[in-house]
Image (spheres, grey):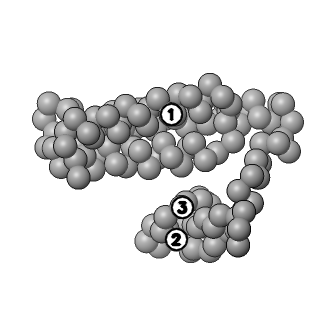
Amino acid sequence: MPGTVEVSKCVSASGKAAYSDGPCPAGAVASTVRLQRDLNLADGMSVEAREASNRANAALVAQQQSYERQVLPSAGNATQAGECSALDANVKWIDTMARQPQGAAMQDWLRNERQRARDRRFRLGCR
């Protein structure tokens, strides 16, 4: 349908929902959601709700970065293929975060982080 986009809603066994433009992970129940392209969910949020959402998203970003620092091997020891896969996963995670209602500063930060990861992929010659 013109003017709409379809995304996958993935519900895990624990009941947590995530939305993706790709397939759902194994074990998740998938359904399709059709949205208007010009729909901005943040338009219906109060200023307080937006600020709370931005704070929660910033906390998630910090938590994810901390986790990645723990589990990703250092760049000097990583194999190129492993680093390419990690960068791909990071870009997917950034894209997921960028689809959430965010403030301009957070969207700029996500854009910069995505560009850094894509630049690193290019320098490594990832396929």
Residue 56 in the image, given as x and y percentages of width and height: 65, 35
Q: Is residue 54 left or right of residue 126?
A: right
Q: Amino acid at mark 1?
A: Arg
Residue on which the image places disc 2: 28
Residue 121 screen position, x and y as percent: 27, 40
In three-dimensional space, the C-alpha distance between marks 3 and 1, rounded to whole angstroms, equals 18 Å
Q: Please tell me how crowded label 1 is: few (under 14), some (14-19), or many (20+) other residues with Cα within 10 Å.
A: some
Q: Are marks 3 and 2 in contact (CB under 8 Å)?
A: no
Work out whether residue 82 can be spotted.
no
For the point 57% across and 42% down, the residue is: 98
Instruction: Examine the rendered structure and indicate whether residue 121 appears above or below residue 1.
Output: above
In the picture, residue 76 is in which quadrant? top left
Question: Label 1 belongs to which residue?
Answer: 111
> Would residue 85 be found to the left or right of residue 111 on screen?
left
- Which amino acid, by three-letter code, is at mark 3? Asp
Looking at the rendered image, the disc whose residue lies closer to the viewer, 1 or 2, is 1
Task: Indicate the amino acid at tag 2.
Answer: Ala
Q: Which mark sits nearer the N-terminus, 3 or 1?
A: 3
User: Can the viewer see residue 99?
Assistant: yes
Q: Nearer the viewer, residue 70 or 2?
A: 2
